[in-house]
Amino acid sequence: MLSLFLAAALQASSPADASPVINQIRETGTLTAPKPTTAGDFPPPLQPTPVPAPERVDWPISEGDHIVHDFKFRSGESAAEVRIHYTTLGQPHRNAAGEIDNAIMVLHGTGGSGKQFLVPQFANFLYGPGQPFDISKYWIILPDNIGHGASSKPSDGQHMRFPKYDYDDMVELQHKLLTDGLGLKHIRLIFGTSMGCMHGFIWGETYPDFPKALMPMACMPTQIAGINRQWRQLAMDAITSDPAWMGGEYETQPIQGIRTASSILFIAGSRPLFYQTQNPTRDHAVASVRAAVESDMARRDANDFLYQFDSSRNYNPWPGIEKIKAPTMWINSADDFINPRNFPYPEWTVKRNPAIQFRMIPETTETQGHGTHTWAKFWIEDLKVLMARTGE
């Protein structure tokens, strides 16, 4: 088997691009063992590069709840009331017709909440004077999706009897919040990360005349299949296979199931170059990953987790990509495990719909894998261009 591998390698590579091993075999017909290595042959271990934490700003926010009555879910279930919590920054502005014309909605990812967009790496670049989401000019709406944050969710008491919501239900509830709750007829921009990115594509197809612009960050406009479906399923299976889960009727969290699920999430959200720089030794790496998993576990509820991840089951905007009218700036990052850089969907998408533009953020030692979507310094110029070309 090894000889077959070497023969294939010799045939496939040219001297210019072959490895030293391949060139040695090509020139001599043999492979000799390299001289024993010594400690001096290895580079010194990297030292962790400190990443300065941006200063957190105490942004002025308002919060509210919109109650949706008698909501019918795609599963056939219904709820007498669904509570959608939201956070806002800035104030609504009304045009001459009395319509709100300065609203921007920012949509969070799976397991998140609207308040995640108050973190410095996002907020400090966007909400200040003269910045793209300047809160003296725009009204920023940060919803907590159903199943998340302070909105209605299984852990409120229904556990696994909570209605089985999906992405289309979530987008419809967002629409009801904006129209019935906040009085909007149109919105300046819908910006979404991860799950919110996928919601953005659904918005563009379901309500094509509602958003003036879309900026989906870190997703694909296709059914979740392949490795993206597999790691999600493994994380859910980790919880449901833990006897302590008890069919969702646990009194204390099923810790082993949540630990395994959080560990899988860590890998899915990893960023190789950044982690290698920050964790250059075995001890750094072990301490870092254990701390990250413990931190993630502390904020998880098992039933909420299951609903959050299962809600993607019906997502598939691919057949309707041509329905999107709003100018769209779609951005992924090259070090995103969840949305691999070598998938052909971006190229196919922009060919099918000229309203959609795509950019891949190159991988560096500073990019954050899937989480690059919340680090504004990597894509703020794209946002400025989108806002400028869709008018003020």
Image (cartoon, helix red, strand yellow):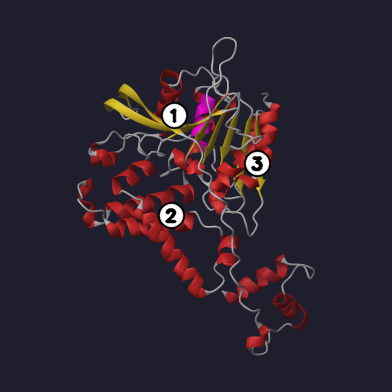
Earlier along the polypeptide chain: callout 2 or callout 1?
Answer: 1
Mark 3–mark 1 distance (CA, rounded to whole Å): 25 Å
Asked if the residue at tag 1 contacts the one at tag 2, i.e. Cβ–Cβ closer than 8 Å, the answer is: no
Q: Amino acid at mark 3?
A: Ile
On the image, numbered disc 3 is attached to which residue?
Answer: 380
N-terminal of the two: label 3 or label 2? 2
Between circles 3 and 1, the one closer to the viewer is: 3
Residue at the spot of label 2: 265
Question: Which residue occupies the foreground of this view, 231 or 380?
Answer: 380
Query: In the rendered structure, does residue 101 fall within the stretch colored magenta?
Result: no
Residue drawn at x 44%, y 29% is 171
Mark 3 secondary-structure assignment: helix
Residue at 53 percent across and 49 percent down: it is 371
Which numbered tag is attached to residue 346? none
Q: Element at badge 1?
A: helix
Residue 171 is marked as 1
Query: Magenta stretch: residue 198 in it?
Result: yes
Q: Quarter of the image holding residue 376?
A: top right
Q: Position of residue 133 (x, y in %)?
A: 60, 33
Magenta range: 197-205
Q: Earlier in the sequence, mark 3 or mark 1?
A: 1
Q: What x and y, as percent, mark residue 176?
A: 41, 22
Number of marks in the rendered image: 3
Using a 10 Å C-alpha cutoff, classify the residue at mark 2 as few (fewer than 14 neighbours), some (14 to 19) or many (20 or more).
Answer: some
Q: Position of residue 152 (x, y in %)?
A: 32, 34
- Point out residue 287 in the picture as x, y percentages from the top left corner: 45, 69
The answer to whether 47 is drawn above or below residue 381 in the figure is below
Name the residue nearer the viewer: 49 or 145. 49
